[in-house]
Image (tube, rainbow, N blue to C red):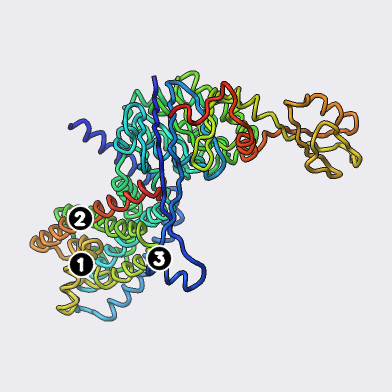
Amino acid sequence: MAVIEVQRLQKVFRAKTKEQGLRGSLKALWRPTYNEIIAVKEISFRVETGELLAFIGPNGAGKSTTIKMLTGILTPTAGTASVLGMVPWEKRRQLAYVIGSVFGQKSQLWYHLPALDSFRLLGSIYELEGKTYEKRLAQVVELFELDEFIKTPVRKLSLGQRMRCEIAASILHRPKVIFLDEPTIGLDVVAKLKIRELIKRLNEEEKTTIFLTSHDAGDIEQLCRRVIVVNHGEMILDTSTSYLKHNYLTTKIVNVRFAAPCPDLTLSQAEIIKHTEKGVKFRVDTKLVSIENVLSELFAQAHTADISVEEPPMEEIIRDIYGRPAEAGEQNAAGWN
Amino acid sequence: MQLAGTRALHKYLRVAEVSLTNRIVYVADHLASSLFLILILFIFSQLWRTVLGEGGEIAGLDSTRMLWYMLFTEVMTLSTPNSHRMVSEEVKSGDIAYKLVRPYSYILYYFAVHCGEFAIRCLTNLTIGAVFAYFVMGPLPVHWAQLLWAALSTCLAAAVNFLMSFSLALLAFWLEDNRPFFWIQNKMIFIFGGLFIPVEAYPAGLRLASYLLPLRYGVSAPARLLVDFNLAMACQLLTGQIIWTALLGLLVWAMFRKGVRRVHVNGG
């Protein structure tokens, strides 16, 4: 059963424009001119119950605008959408009781108080009665492993701990759908892994439908079964994560720190991006060569102190998608129309 | 229906409670504000003693009552929170959008925040100020019924102050910089609010202006009832407060409705 249904949803913003200089400013006062910006362009998709969907794209792609429309904050310029059978912008207040949302770095916790106080407040806001709240709180604390720091003022928590509290706060009322807008933004590698693990558990154990936006390819690769890619407001790909992984997430960027200087390094099967006395950064296309071979070549020439592997930036993936023709088995954006 | 009402009331009471708890963190700020209050009261105790001496009066108040009057007006002003600044910032930055996804009324949420913070500030300022005034100028004879009227008037004054500031904060929907309006409001409180001298002592024109504006109902109404109570004045002041609460409430509701439409259309 579909919990989210979107049909040709469009959002156009009007932005004031002004010519340069004083004359331009005066003219804009007298006769303002506007530019239309299409933030979301006729997108259509369905999300089924219990799905963990990634909605990805670079900055300004229209991800947050879409979430804002699906949570009822924004009214679309055209098209229709239904979340749990409700039109979000018409039933915003009723919808709020059955959905949850976390918007990147916009906190819903009281900064100087322990997260527990904010949880209690949210319990009242979502009208959870005494025992129901206590029972639910215990579940959430266990699920998100908050015991250690739930009574610590939020200002003293690390960003990763705070994000755990943010997500926990947004599921206290057992939402059927949760919108996570960039939940791993600004987190270090360890905190990111923890958040990903918790999101996965939330989806598996509570069967919560998760609509996740991110511009971190790692979030998608490790969490989601399905991915929608948007760029300039348009859906450019709607496919399985495994398809995306095997076809577009094949490039890995490897950072190596040397234990001893290695000025004459050569890697025949990788593209060196940067090479200094202290380390090297190179790109490997795992579809063409085995990363094992590249690393063997590296180890033969240099003593390494540290190695990290990065996913390619979202902009690169988008460029790659545009650069290739759609293949069989790939559900492109037009598929749902 | 009744259950829904109780739940809604419980929701906003909890917001007020959290706001009050949050404010306790700023104990040092409270003490600084209370020290400022004591300094002001000390200066004015000397001033009223010199100006009024024995038997002198302003609007029927001798030097002791004048100081107590000023204590109550200052407590009202110093205890009024700056939550409107937060609202103003949220409107300007578009962060208001993120508050709209919660199941509560944005206006009532901030009213509850305002009440919680006002309660703790008022309590500390009043306690410290009253101890000072008692030792410097002597006691203020007050009947318990007077206290009830004054308590009711204080609640209404807090509502009037909140609505005045909130309406100015909402101007951020249309104006890039609404700070000058807060500046003007602050200065007008001195004169039309009757912060230092009861407005009854003003010349006719100025007095009429004070009666017609909401400032007096937010600043000096409770003070007037505490230092010089009479039933007619109590009824007049409370009626004024109720009317202004209703009028400003309507204004805030209309402004918010119109402003929030911009958020729904433009995203902030």
Disc 1 packing (10 Å; few <14; some 14–19; many ≥20): some
| Residue depicted at 50% across the width and 19% down the height | A204
Please tell me whether mark 2 sits on a helix, a strand or a loop.
helix
Residue B185: x percent and y percent? 31, 67
Q: Upstream in the sequence, badge 3 or badge 1?
A: 3
Disc number for residue B245: 2
Q: Nearer the viewer, mark 3 or mark 1?
A: 1
The type of residue carrying mark 3 is Phe
**Does the residue at mark 3 contact the one at mark 1 (Cβ under 8 Å)?**
no
Q: Upstream in the sequence, badge 1 or badge 2?
A: 1
Q: Give the residue number, with chain letter if any, for mark 1.
A: B213
Q: Give the residue number, with chain letter if any, for mark 3.
A: B36
**Does the residue at mark 3 contact the one at mark 2 (Cβ under 8 Å)?**
no
Residue A242: x percent and y percent? 60, 22
Disc 3 packing (10 Å; few <14; some 14–19; many ≥20): some
Whether discs 3 and 2 lie on one chain: the answer is: yes
Whether discs 3 and 1 lie on one chain: the answer is: yes
The type of residue carrying mark 2 is Thr
Disc number for residue A186: none
Quarter of the image where one finds residue A268: top right
